Image (cartoon, rainbow, N blue to C red):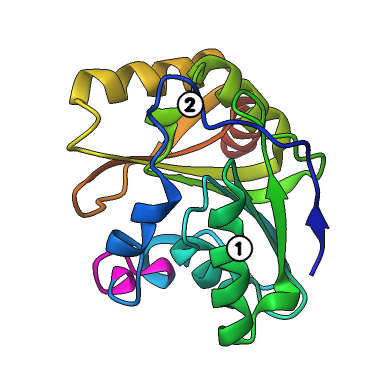
Amino acid sequence: MNTDTMQDTQVHGEGRVCPWQRVRHFDNVLRPLVHNPRKLFGPYVRSGMTVLDVGCGGGFASLGLARLVGEDGMVISVDLQPEMLEIVRERAARAGLLERITLHRCEPGQIGVRTRVDFAVAFWMVHEVPDIGVFLREMYALLSPGGRFFLAEPKIHTSQLEFERTVEEGTQAGLVVLEKPKVRFSRAVVLGRAEHTSQRDGSQQ
């Protein structure tokens, strides 16, 4: 297990970040029954991949992704709150997945990861980001050629119009819409790097 230690930061001043004390109410052993990581991410993740879970919370996605990438893969679990990362560490240790997960504490306006990734997840967290455009440009830079970005937002916090604006900011950052998976209680999209998609489409002509 590798842990990137970053300077202490406060939860974003707008107060939109979900407090770590509440995470066990919705990110617990029952969560995979509602949001099954294998069903959600399995079509995009293969053994040996490096994947990113941004705003990992209690780790339901991180643990599921760790199982999908296998012993040769790596999951980078990112969160603003160190308490969230400690919850992920504890759960990963109990599940025997600790060696496949790297914990990284981000800052309010920056992910701060330097490793390119094959797949990234931002599940129910983009509405908490202070500048969505900056966030999506950083996500674009982190994706390897052919990489995929799975973005899901809760319907209760994000209207259809707000979600469409987020997707539009993604296209302005250089991402393209590849799929619109159905996710319970969510609005979701899978994005990819535009230049890779153009090359793929051109090769089919």
Above or below: residue 27 compared with residue 120: below
Identify the secondary structure beneath mark 1.
Answer: helix
> Residue 34 in magenta?
yes
Q: Quadrant of residue 93?
A: bottom right
Tag of residue 116? none
Q: Which residue is mark 1?
A: 86
x and y percent of residue 161 in the render?
Answer: 22, 18
The type of residue carrying mark 1 is: Glu
Quarter of the image for the C terminus: give it: top right
Mark 1 surroundings: few (<14), some (14-19) or many (≥20) residues within 10 A: some
Q: Is residue 114 above or below residue 98?
A: above
Q: Which residues are magenta?
A: 31-37
Q: Which image quadrant is residue 35 in? A: bottom left
Q: Name the spot of residue 50 as percent of width and height, x first.
A: 72, 58
Q: Can residue 92 be spotted in the picture? A: yes
What separation in Å lies between label 2 and label 1 (alpha carbons)?
21 Å
In terms of secondary structure, what is the magenta stretch mainly? helix
Q: Residue at x 40, y 23 (%)?
A: 167
Residue contact between numbered discs 2 and 1, judged by CB atoms under 8 Å: no
| Residue 112 on image: x %, y % | 74, 34
Question: Residue shown at 53%/71% (left/top)?
Answer: 63
Left or right: residue 18 compared with residue 158: right
Q: Looking at the figure, which quarter contains the N terminus?
A: bottom right
Q: Was residue 132 drawn as part of the magenta stretch in this picture?
A: no
Is 132 drawn above or below residue 128 in the view shown? above
Q: Secondary structure at mark 2?
A: loop
Residue drawn at 46 percent across, 16 percent down? 169
Residue behind mark 2: 129
| Residue 72 image point, x, y percent | 77, 75
